[in-house]
Amino acid sequence: MSYAVNRFVRKHSLRYILGGNPEWQDPNDMSMVGLSTQMINPTALTLNIIVALITILQFYRAGHFSWRLFWPFAVLAIPCAFLGGYLNLPSTAFKILVDIVLLISAFR
């Protein structure tokens, strides 16, 4: 892993965990540090898994975690996340899709 990518991953993982703000996952932000479209999907997937594990651990320690509620989401979300991470979309289609998802989430 190059120095720029390593620095990017560490900086934004910490920022995402502390602030809970996923806006840095915009493809334009990731491409500014030299990540190609092919690297954005697995990088976002890896960072989201790390953040999810840390969050689960924090909820478990605080006594707010329910395995009965969690397992249906995990059974469906984990395979879908891996599938999404390995989809190969053209760069323009990927950026348009991410923009649409961000716009929809902004209006909610």
Image (cartoon, grey):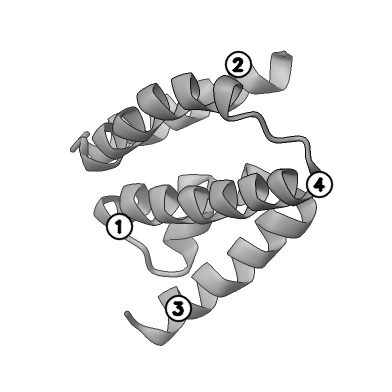
Q: Which residue is mark 1?
A: 39
Which residue in the structure is indicated by mark 4? 62
Quarter holding residue 70: top right
Residue 65 against residue 25 in the figure, above or below = above
Mark 4 closeness class: few <14, some 14–19, many ≥20 residues within 10 Å:
few
Q: Are marks 3 and 2 in contact (CB under 8 Å)?
A: no
Left or right: residue 7 compared with residue 42? right
Q: Quick check: 51 above or below 76?
A: below
Disc 1 marks a residue whose amino acid type is: Met
Tell me: 36 left or right of 55: left
- Between label 2 and label 4, give the one nearer the viewer: 4
Which residue in the structure is indicated by mark 3?
6
Q: Amino acid at mark 4?
A: Ala
Earlier along the polypeptide chain: callout 3 or callout 2? Answer: 3
Q: Say which element carries label 2.
A: helix
Q: Amino acid at mark 3?
A: Asn
Residue 62 in percent (x, y) is at: 81, 46
What's the CA distance linking mark 1 and mark 3?
Answer: 13 Å
**Of callouts 3 and 4, which one flags the residue occurring earlier in the amino acid sequence?**
3
**Disc on res. 104:** 2
Please name whichever residue, 98 or 14, is drawn nearer the observer in this view of the structure. 14
Kind of element beneath mark 3? helix
What residue is shown at x 30% (from left), y 51% (from top)?
37
Q: Residue at x 44, y 30 (%)?
A: 74
